[in-house]
Image: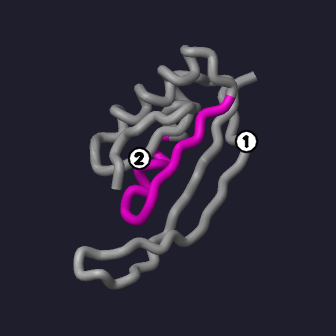
């Protein structure tokens, strides 16, 4: 799973500390993006929620949650088996 790749205005949440991703989201907003997508899969979902809340509570207080999408991604294991993993995308917007 990619930990933190920013293609356009998306932040992928992985296993780093939440503040790493908070910084990435705040940077996206400061670069002029109106919407930033916070994406995560599996065990990183709770960290993605933490990131969104920390951004809203401490750094970009006028940011709002525009949309939350949940789903299931099918990934292939090293052995070649298919595995279903929960996923979330939180869209944060700033007026």
Query: Residue 38: x and y, percent?
Result: 53, 43
In primary-sequence order, the first of circles 2 and 1 is 2
Q: Quadrant of residue 85?
A: bottom left
User: In the image, what residue occupies the spot 48% across and 20% down?
Assistant: 27
Q: For residue 64, what is the image quadrant?
A: top right
- Residue sitting at x 46%, y 54%: 40
Q: Residues within 10 Å of mark 1 (few under 14, many from 20)?
A: few
As rendered, which of 69 and 62 lies closer to the eye? 69
Residue range of the region highlighted in magenta in the rendering: 35-51
- Between 88 and 2, the one nearer to me in the picture: 2
Q: Is residue 48 magenta?
A: yes
| Scheme of image coloration | one colour
Residue drawn at (37%, 63%) of the image: 43
Q: Secondary structure at mark 2?
A: strand
Q: Residue 51's x, y, as percent?
A: 46, 40
- Outermost front residue: 80
Residue 34 horizontal/vertical position (percent):
69, 25
Residue tagged by mark 1? 66
Residue 70 shown in magenta: no
Give the position of the C terminus as an image quadrant: top right
Label placed on residue 13 = 2
């Amino acid at each position: 799973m990619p930990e933190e790749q920013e293609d356009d205005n998306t932040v992928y949440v992985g296993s780093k500390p939440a503040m790493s991703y908070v910084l990435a989201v705040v940077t996206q907003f400061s670069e002029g993006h109106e919407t930033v997508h916070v994406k995560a899969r599996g065990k990183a979902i709770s960290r993605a929620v933490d990131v969104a809340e920390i951004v809203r509570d401490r750094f970009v207080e006028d940011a709002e949650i525009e949309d939350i999408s949940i789903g299931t991604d099918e990934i292939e294991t090293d052995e070649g088996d298919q595995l279903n993993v929960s996923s979330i995308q939180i869209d944060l917007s700033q007026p």
